[in-house]
């Protein structure tokens, strides 16, 4: 019948389309400075986090419109002055900002092309803790405070080479 022939023809066209080879153009590659990268390849580019060996960017053609095909899955925080602190998905950092306010931030870079930095004032950010080996008590040190219970190091005695928080 006519309806069956039309349905069979439509199915044949769909099968042919599915079996046709697809090109690997912008859907699977990125181009930068005349070099073609495959999806997921590390792209040799310096980003705001600095060294590409520590903070590599990856080819992601899905981000061609908004990020030039680069996925740099790192969060960055201006931490006072010209300092930029970078950290990876799932990491947290703690620091004192330019006003000496303790701050802790977390990074969510799980969605390609999007990073979310969540920060809050943290009175314990940037402080150090040291265990007293005599009684096991933890002491909280402020930045600049000397460690009291560290032993001598390969550099010499603690008196000659003190360590600071």
Image (cartoon, grey):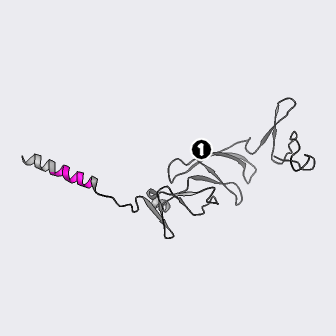
Q: Secondary structure at mark 1?
A: loop
The residue at the point 42 percent across, 58 percent down is 28
Residue 122 x/y as whole percent = 70, 42
Magenta run includes residue 10: yes
Tell me which corner region of the image, top left, top right, bottom left or bottom right, holds residue 26.
bottom left
Magenta run includes residue 75: no
Left or right of 5? Residue 103 is right
Name the residue at the right extreme. Answer: 159
Residue 56 x/y as whole percent = 58, 57
Highlighted range, magenta? 9-17
Left or right of 4? Residue 50 is right
Name the residue at the top extreme. Answer: 135
Left or right of 5? Residue 109 is right
Main secondary-structure element of the magenta-colored stretch: helix
User: Which residue is more in the foreground, 70 or 139?
Assistant: 70
The residue at the point 72 percent across, 59 percent down is 81
Name the residue at the bottom extreme. Answer: 34
Check disc 1: other Cα within 10 Å, few if <14, some if 14-19, many if 20+.
few
Residue 127 x/y as whole percent = 77, 43
The residue at the point 13 percent across, 50 percent down is 6
User: Which residue is more in the foreground, 71 or 41?
Assistant: 41
Tell me which corner region of the image, top left, top right, bottom left or bottom right, holds residue 126.
top right
User: How many circles with numbers are drawn on the protein?
Assistant: 1
User: Which residue is more in the foreground, 80 or 84?
Assistant: 84
Residue 158 x/y as whole percent = 90, 46
Pointer 1 residue: 90
The residue at the point 55 percent across, 51 percent down is 115
């Amino acid at each position: 019948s006519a309806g069956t022939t039309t349905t069979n023809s439509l199915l044949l066209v769909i099968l042919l389309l599915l079996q046709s080879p697809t090109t690997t153009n912008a859907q699977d590659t990125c181009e930068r400075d005349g070099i073609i990268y495959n999806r997921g390849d590390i792209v040799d580019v310096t980003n705001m986090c600095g060294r590409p060996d520590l903070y590599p960017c990856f080819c992601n053609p899905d981000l061609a419109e908004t990020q030039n095909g680069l996925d740099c899955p790192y969060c960055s925080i201006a931490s006072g002055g010209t300092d930029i602190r970078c950290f990876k998905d799932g990491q947290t950092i703690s620091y004192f900002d330019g006003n000496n306010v303790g701050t802790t931030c977390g990074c969510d870079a799980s969605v390609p092309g999007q990073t979310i930095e969540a920060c809050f004032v943290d009175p314990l950010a940037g402080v150090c803790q040291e265990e007293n080996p005599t009684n096991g008590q933890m002491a909280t040190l402020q930045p600049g405070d000397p460690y009291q219970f560290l032993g001598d190091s390969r550099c010499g005695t603690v008196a000659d080479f003190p360590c600071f928080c």
